[in-house]
Image (spheres, helix red, strand yellow):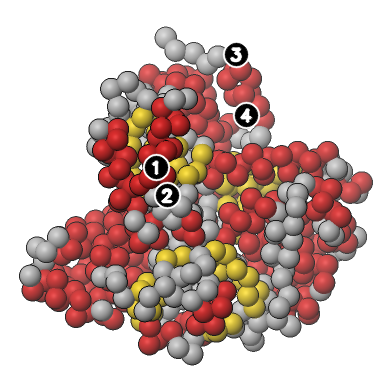
Amino acid sequence: MIEFSETAHQRYEQILKRYPEKRAAVLPVLTLAQREFGWISPEVAEYVGNLMGYPASDMLSVASFYTMLHKRPVGKYHIEVCRNVSCWLMGTYRCVDEIKRRLNIGLGEVTPDGKFSLALTECLGSCGTAPAMQVGDRYFENLTPEGVAEILEKLSND
Amino acid sequence: MIKVLLANIDKPDQVKIEKYRERGGYKALEKTLAMEQSAVIEEVKASGLRGRGGAGFPTGMKWSFVPRNTGKQTFLLCNADESEPGTFKDRLLMERDPHMMIEGMAIAAYALNCHLAYIYLRGEYEFIAYTIQQALDEAYQAKMLGPSVFGRDYSLDIHLHLGQGAYICGEETSLIESLEGYRGYPRLKPPFPAVSGFLASPTVVNNVETLCAVPWIMLNGAAAYAAMGTEKSKGTKLFSVSGHVARPGTYEVELGYPLMDFINNEAGGVTGKLKAVIPGGSSVPVLTAAECDGVNLDYESLLKAGSMLGSGGMIVFNDSIKMPEVLSVIADFYAHESCGQCTPCREGTGWAAKIMRNLVAGNGKRSDIDLLYKIVDMMEGKTICPLADADVMPIRSFVTKFRAEFEAMCAR
C-alpha cells in the first residue's frame, strides 16, 4: 500500500483550496503524486482515485492525455530533448546521439542504475536558444554535443 | 519606437514588486479601480487591442460578451500555455516582468467583475512558476490582490495552475477542460466560454501578452495605443524569431513594421541566403523568400500575402535546408499533438506524418503528393478545434510552394 507523506498530504489540502470544485484539482494532485511516487502506476492512479473519490480508470485516462505524467518508470533525471523545427535546425539530433552514446540507452529507455532516461519532446519554447532540453524542472539551452557531455557528467556526480 | 511590453524587461530586479512599482507599476490598476467597470471595457475596446495568442480576436469585444448578473461567478483565465512551435515571447514576459501580467489580469478581472482568476502555465515552464508564485505572493502582501485590492471594496484571488504537457491545451476550450481536471478535449462552440466556460460559468481566456498590454493602455489611454500600428492592427506586438538569423530572440515592434526590416535589423540578418520564413508559428502558411518582400508585420498584410500573423513565432530558413524535411518535422508534431477526438484530425495528421517520413526517407512516390492534398482537403474545416487546420496550412503551403523539392525526393 502506498500513501502520501505528511508533507504531501498538507500540499494536497492546500491544492484543494485553490479550486471551487474538487475535480479541478485532479491534474495538480496527479502531478503531486508523480513527485511522490515517480510515475503514475495503476497503483498510484488507484490511490489518487480513492483519495479524491474517482475511479482509478478515470485517473489513468486523464494521466494518459498528458505527456509529462509518466505511465511507466523514468530515470531520476528524465532527459527530454526538443525535436521541433528550430531545435532540429540547430542540430538537436547531434546532441541526442551524444546522449545515447554516453548513456548507452535509446529513446524511451532508462539506464540500468535508474539514474537517467531519455526521450524526445515537442517545442519547449526555447527556439531562440536552440537546441534545448529539459531535465525535471530545469532547462538546458544552446546545447552542443560537448555541452551535453558536461551536463551529463555533472548530473551523474549529483 | 515606444515599448509597451519590453520597456523594463532588461532592468535589474524588475521581477520584484518594489522595482516594478518604482517604475510605474500598479498605477494603472489604481487608476482603473476608480473607474466604472464598463468604462474599462470601452477603453480596451477603443485601443483596438487584439488577442496576441494567435487568433487576433478583439480583446475588448471578447470582454463585452460576458453576460452580467447571471448569478454565476465570472472567471478570468490567463493562457500561459505557450506551445506553438517557434513561439517564446510570453516566457520572456513572465520570467522578467511577471507583475505586468498580474496587473493586467487584475485590471481585466475588475472590468469583468471577476473575483477568481487562474494562470494556466504550461508544465514545462515550471522553472518560471517559482518566479510567478513569488510575484503573486508579493502582490498579496502589498494588497494588490486579496480581499480588498488597493483598499477598495473589490476582492481578487489569482492562482497558478500548471498543465502537464499537451499542446492542445493552448486552445481555450481545451484549456478549460484541462483546468476542470479532465483530458484536454476541445469543446464545440457555441456555447462560447464567455457564456459557458470554466465550471459552466462565464469565462474569459486571454493570452499573457494580451493582458500585459492592458496596464499601458489604461495608464496612457486607448488613443495613445491606437495611434501605433495600422488601421486594423493597433499597437505593438512581440515577435520571437529563431532559426537562421544572427540574433534570435524576442523583439517588440509596432504592428505594420516591414518583415524584412525586422529580419535584417532586429534579428541581425539571415545567416546564409534566405529561403523561407514561417512568420507566425508552425501553424501558419510558409512564405518563400520572394514573398517576404513588401510584407508588413500586421494582421492584414500577412493575410494578404497568404499567411497569418499567428502568435508572432517567426522561424527563418536559409537555403541549406530541404523543405520536405522541415515539413516532416512539423507533420510529426501535429500527429503527436492531435487529441484524437475528431477522426479527420486523428487519422489525417497521422497519415500526413507517415507519408512525409516515407518521402524524406527516399521511399516516396509522386502520387503521395496528390494524396497529401487529398488528406488535407478531408481535414480542413471538419473538426471541433483548429488543430487540424493548423496542420493543413503548413502542409498545403510547403507542398505548393516548394513542389519541385518534393518531386525530386520522390524521383529517387
Q: Which residue is mark 4?
A: A16
Q: Given this view, does label 4 or label 1 mark the residue nearer the observer?
A: 1
- The residue type indicated by label 4 comes to Leu
Disc 1 residue type?
Answer: Val
Disc 4 crowd rating (10 Å Cα; few below 14, some 14-19, many 20+) is some
Residue at 75% over, 38% down: B137
Q: Nearer the viewer, mark 4 or mark 2?
A: 2
The picture places residue A79, in percent across and down from the top left corner, at: 39, 37
Residue under circle 3?
A: A6
Q: Earlier in the sequence, mark 4 or mark 1?
A: 4
Q: Earlier in the sequence, mark 4 or mark 2?
A: 4
Identify whether A109 is placed above or below B238: above
Instruction: Please report, as a chain letter, where disc 2 is located.
Output: A
Q: Is residue B354 visible?
A: yes
Q: In which chain is the residue bearing label 3? A: A
Answer with the quarter of the image where residue B325 lies: bottom left
User: Residues at marks 3 and 4, common chain?
Assistant: yes
